[in-house]
Amino acid sequence: HIRSCLFVLLLLVYLFTIGGNMLIFLVIRLDAALHKPMYHFVSVLSFLELWYTATTMPKMLANLLSEKKTISFAGCLLQTYFFHSLGASECYLLTAMAYDRYLAICRPLHYPSIMTTALCVKMAAGCWTCGFLCPISEVILVSQLPFCNYNEIPHIFCDFPPLLSLACKDTSTNVLVDFAVNAFIILITFLFIMASYGRIIGAVLKIKTAAGRRKAFSTCASHLIVVLIFFGSIIFMYVRLKKSYSLTLDRTLAVVYSVLTPLANPIIYSLRNKELIQAIKRTFFKKVEKASPTH
């Protein structure tokens, strides 16, 4: 009975996540008024979230309906690789978005000449490329570990920490490599984002009018909320030098960054952005008017 309720709840969350991110992606692509660098990065983030949730949630849904919850070793490694690749890509993409907001607020006169369409495309492509290269060394090291006896993954999806806890040999090298890779990706990008927002806040405080300060900061408030939710959970989860883990805490954090963050992104960006809401209305009502019969 509990599994059925969880399945319905998770299915609704998954459908809302897909629908919300797909809506934002399509509206930004279809509405010419949103063809700006900031919205280009938001659309790329929404597209990334579609794949990010697809790596874990369909299997989680299937497990809730199945009595025998199994996954092959190759399938487990693939799930782990794509989950970390897309997570790393999101770290880099959120950093690129912070840089975009820094240029727009702190260097507004140079912004149009620096943040061109070509640079936006290159930055987005660089985020995806670097993200997919980062976990390769970790996956190779895990694939060479011996796993003895019956292996039950004490987690809601395949990930490096629970896999390392199942290995029947010393995994100190794996733990050290995981820490080095994760610390580089997560901490460096987070510090860069915070440095950008430190500059942004300093520039906003120099604006003389309250309305001007409010308008300037409202353009990056949504992004900052997403950053704090996402990085707050993954820093505690992955930047640590130990092999033993609290399973309850890990599962809770996993729900935050794998389920709730992709769900919250379209809500945060749509509710806090009047320009995006207006674009959604324009796109939606335009389609309705075209479909309605004329008299």
Image (cartoon, rainbow, N blue to C red):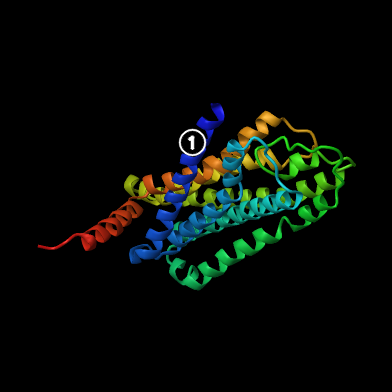
Q: Is residue 147 visible?
A: yes
- At horizontal 37% and vertical 50% (from top left) the residue drawn is 273
Q: Nearer the viewer, residue 57 or 212?
A: 57
Q: Residue furthest right?
A: 169
State whether residue 79 is above or below residue 150. below
Considering the image in quadrants, where does the C terminus appear? bottom left
Q: Position of residue 110 (x, y in %)?
A: 46, 68
Give the image quarter of residue 164: top right
Q: Position of residue 267 (x, y in %)?
A: 42, 44
Give the image quarter of residue 123: bottom right
Identity, as a three-letter code, of the amino acid under mark 1: Val
CA neighbours of label 1 inside 10 A, class few (<14), some (14 to 19), many (20+) = few
* Residue 155 in the figure: left or right of residue 8: right
- At horizontal 88% and vertical 40% (from top left) the residue drawn is 168
- At horizontal 32% and vertical 55% (from top left) the residue drawn is 280
Residue that badge 1 annotates: 8
Q: Position of residue 239 (x, y in %)?
A: 71, 42
Give the image quarter of residue 169: top right
